[in-house]
Image: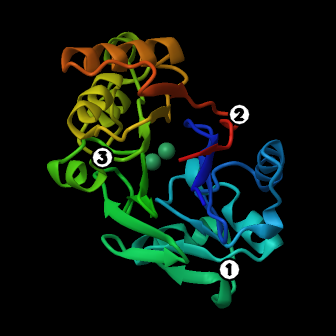
Amino acid sequence: MSLQYSVLASGSTGNSLYIETEKHKLLVDCGLSGKRMVELLSHINRDPKDLDGILVTHEHSDHIKGLGVFARRFQIPIYANTKTWQAMSDSIGKIDNDQKFTFETGTVKEFGSLQIESFGVSHDAAEPMFFSFHHEDKKLTLLTDLGYVSDRIKGVIRESDAYIIEANHDIQMLMMGRYPWNIKRRILGDSGHISNEDAGLALSEVIGHNTKRIYLAHLSKDNNMKDLARMSVEQKLGQYGIQLGEDIGLFDTDPDTPTRLCAI
Ligand SMILES: [Zn+2]
Ligand SMILES: [Zn+2]
């Protein structure tokens, strides 16, 4: 049996990833309203009542906006590290103890045959973490919201079958754009977001012979465009001798439309 996934939504307006094996159905983040989360799941013919858990990467509102409402309504367990629990407690409202679980950074959590490896990233939140999902001999990595891709992270995410990776901004567009300087500096800094070029460069170092699909995620709506992101990543990979095409596909994600439910 395969590992199936859909990026339900991605971008500064809200993020959520759906993932399932034959036995378990999970979300990573719940960054849109509870109502919108139900609609997004219905696009891929999935029912919120069947979810076994929601993993939380960090407490920024584009990752937890609907979390409290949605988890309470459908009685879904929430998994986050201790510092993220503390940081988000005021925003998500009361969560029953039997729905509260800790998943610490740098540990592995198992849901049947699915092993989820968490790792820390540099980003301006309490203790942000992202995941590589291991299922049978397949691996899927989710990596957004980080200022730079460290060697440690590259080691963890190496040779994934699929990557959902941040391509937040085009550096030129950001620099020329209307954002005030302190915001620009935050985005460009070590605890901000990675650019299209950063994404391409990191991918060039971690792609393996098994890598089939790359999804560009968390695009800034002001400082990036889908075509530009794809072009920049493709160009960067080309510089390192990696050609996209039949072997490796490059895909968009969208702030408001789920990607096709896909299996690796
Ligand atoms: Zn975010
Ligand atoms: Zn964030």
Amino acid type indicated by mark 2: Asp
Q: Which residue is mark 2?
A: 256
User: Residue 188 placed where, x, y %?
Assistant: 28, 31
Viewport quadrant of the N terminus: bottom right
Residue 30 - label? none
Q: Is mark 3 within 8 Å of ligand 1?
A: no
Front of the two marks 1 and 3: 3
| Contact? badges 1 and 2 (CB < 8 Å) | no
Q: Which residue is mark 1?
A: 95
Decide which of 114, 221 is in the foreground and name it.
114
Label 2 Cα crowd, 10 Å radius (few <14 / some 14-19 / many 20+): some
As drawn, which residue projects farthest toward the left? 151
**Which residue shows up at 54% across the image and 74% down it?**
79
Decide which of 110, 74 is in the foreground and name it.
110
**Which residue shows up at 59% across the image and 82% down it?**
100
Q: CA distance from mark 1 to mark 3?
A: 37 Å
Identify the element where label 3 is drawn.
loop
Q: Which residue is mark 3?
A: 159
Amino acid type indicated by mark 3: Glu
Number of numbered discs visible in the structure rendering: 3
Q: CA distance from mark 3 to mark 2?
A: 29 Å
User: Residue 120 placed where, x, y %?
Assistant: 31, 61
Label 1 Cα crowd, 10 Å radius (few <14 / some 14-19 / many 20+): some
> In the picture, residue 97 is in which quadrant?
bottom right
